[in-house]
Amino acid sequence: MTRTNEEIVITVPAPLANAARALRRHGVLLAALAIVAAAMAWKTAVVQHAYFKEDDFEFVARAMESELSLDYLTRVHFGQFMPGGFLLAWLSARVEPYGWGVAAGGVLIVHALAALAVYRMLRVVFGNRPAILAPLLVFLIAPITVPALAWWAAALNTVILQLALPMAVASHWHHLRSGRMRHAVAAALWVLVGLLGFVKGFAVPLVLFALTAIYFGGLRSALRRHWPAWLMQAGVLAGFGAIYVQRSLSAPGTGGLPSFEQATGFLWELLGRTFATTVLGGPWTWFAANDWGVASPPTAAVIGSLVVLVALVAVTGHYRRRALLAWATLLGYVVIADALPVLLGRVHLLGSFAGTDTRYVADAAPLIALVVGLVLLPYQGEADPYSRALPARERITGACGVVLGVFAGASLVSVTIFGGYLGADRRHGYIETARAELAKAPADVVVYDRVVPADVMPGSYRSYSLTSRVLGAMASPRLRARMQAPPAALDGMVFDDRGRLVPVEVAGVPLVPRTLDRCWPVTGGTVQVPLDNSARRPAGTLVRLDYSAKADTRVTLWMADRPTDVELRTGVGKIFLLAVPGADRITVPDVPPGVCVGTVTPGQAVPRP
């Protein structure tokens, strides 16, 4: 019997074959996009539970009150010069004032772009290899970035620098390899973007210079061969610095030098506790409540984290050439860009506690990803990357997989615990109630000012703690103007502590006429109503003036040199009007017959009981 061997040929449909080839060609990119999408969905699920707080309210109010001008964009806010952040704030507020979905969504989009920029940076430096997905994952799941995203004011500038830093590194690395000036120009422009987002962007050129000196020929070569790139970046820094200094001179100063104890305590908190633990997936415990949280790792976790970091530095330095210099670059950035500005700005006010806030180091996340790559992987085209023979590939892969898995698990735990503290039902309910009240308020309503409840907005924000600024952001331009300069009215309104519009009353000491009819006497057709203690009366004082009239009539009230016309209604009523600072009396000339001007009460606007 003869057996014929026949070759079996399986024909794969052309679309499947093309898809398979595309997957092999673009597999790393597709995997990166999948990782970014999954991480952003996870962060969105966490951040959606947060809400506006503190500076956020001022940013929304300023955006709604201001045109998109250079004066608005270049305002220095407590030492922060952030035109890019204010641009994002203006756009978000104009789409929907106090719309958390719009505001948080905007910064999450920029953060997602930053993740793609990190992927581009890793691909440019290390090539298109699957191993770059590991440092990308480090950037995406590091707990260090999440608290900043949950605080809109912090995210507005942090995400821009997170985008600019890796883009600058990628462009500069292209320039170093190709020598083309267009890449150097692009790097300088990205430095400018970083500066416009966050003053800390001044440290990006230092990172670029360090990378050049470490990986492209040393210090002298970096200075001699690439001086045009440094000249462009110096020009960017000089121009930005001139504008920043000029604008800072007209801004309230908040800087100051801390004491030695404050400085050392802050550095230990920021570097030894906050950064050392969060860079490994910590801090695992938070000092947190009311939609807010800072790192509060236990002592054992801090000691363990420091030991692990020393071990990682030692092991990578033992095998990988220039690994110690890469670690030093990361530490230098955190000290110069993250610790130093806060040390010279706010530590004297907040003390060492400022070092527990992870938002001060969140901008370092892209550099962490780069350094993780540099201490493990040879960069593209690098010859002889390791100083000694490596262990077996299986052992290296297994060890790196375990470390990455532990980091991922620790990060998930830390972020999940942090997310449990998010939520601001009180602030959200107050804002949404006020939004509904303003929407149905009559066009001619007169709303007097009062301080927003302290559990919504601290009174330390001064004029931006007032309802006319915070809640006025949701009003029409005409009503907002009336809220900030309300006219005299017989039936004024005020926001209560729940955000409802209710009739106004004045909390103060009544000044009662000592006449039998309880009316201030008329002399020569004029009534003089005294306002005692005018020198100690704060700005924004509201005055209630009681009256009675036998018929509808008009009177003119003079306070200092400002006249106010009021239409009185028949019967007993009251007039509400803002006090003029320094005025010691209300003068009513040409008092019509049958009009009695009675008790006057200067004080603060409150809801009527």
Image (cartoon, grey):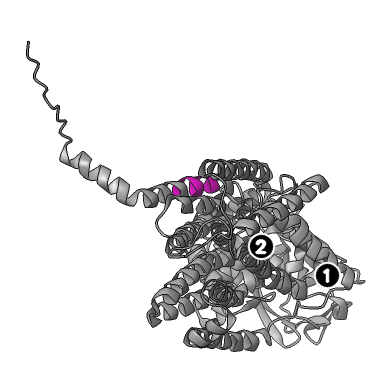
Viewer can see residue 450: yes
Q: Quadrant of the N terminus?
A: top left
Q: Tell me which corner region of the image, top left, top right, bottom left or bottom right, holds residue 3.
A: top left
Left or right: 123, with 399 as reference point = left
The numbered dot on residue 589 is none
Left or right: 467, with 584 as reference point = left
Residue found 11% across the figure and 24% down from its top:
6
In the rendered image, the residue lying farthest to the top is 1
Left or right: 29, with 487 as reference point = left
Q: In terms of depth relative to the viewer, which is nearer, 422 or 323?
A: 323
Instruction: Measuring from the top left, give residue 20's x and y in whole percent.
Output: 26, 42
Magenta region: which residues? Answer: 37-45
Q: What residue is shown with label 1?
A: 263
In the rendered structure, which amino acid carries the disc numbered 2? Val
Residue found 79% across the figure and 72% down from its top:
597
In the rendered structure, which amino acid carries the disc numbered 1? Ala
Inspect the magenta stretch and tell me whether residue 41 lies in it. Answer: yes
* CA–CA distance in space, label 1 to label 2: 17 Å
Instruction: Measuring from the top left, give residue 445's x and y in whole percent.
Output: 59, 63
Q: What residue is shown with label 2?
A: 361
SS for dot 1: helix
Instruction: Measuring from the top left, give residue 330's x and y in whole percent.
Output: 64, 65
SS for dot 2: loop
- From the viewer's perspective, is residue 285 above or below residue 354? above
- From the viewer's perspective, is residue 249 above or below residue 484? below
Inspect the magenta stretch and tell me whether residue 65 lies in it. Answer: no
Residue found 43% across the figure and 81% down from its top:
185
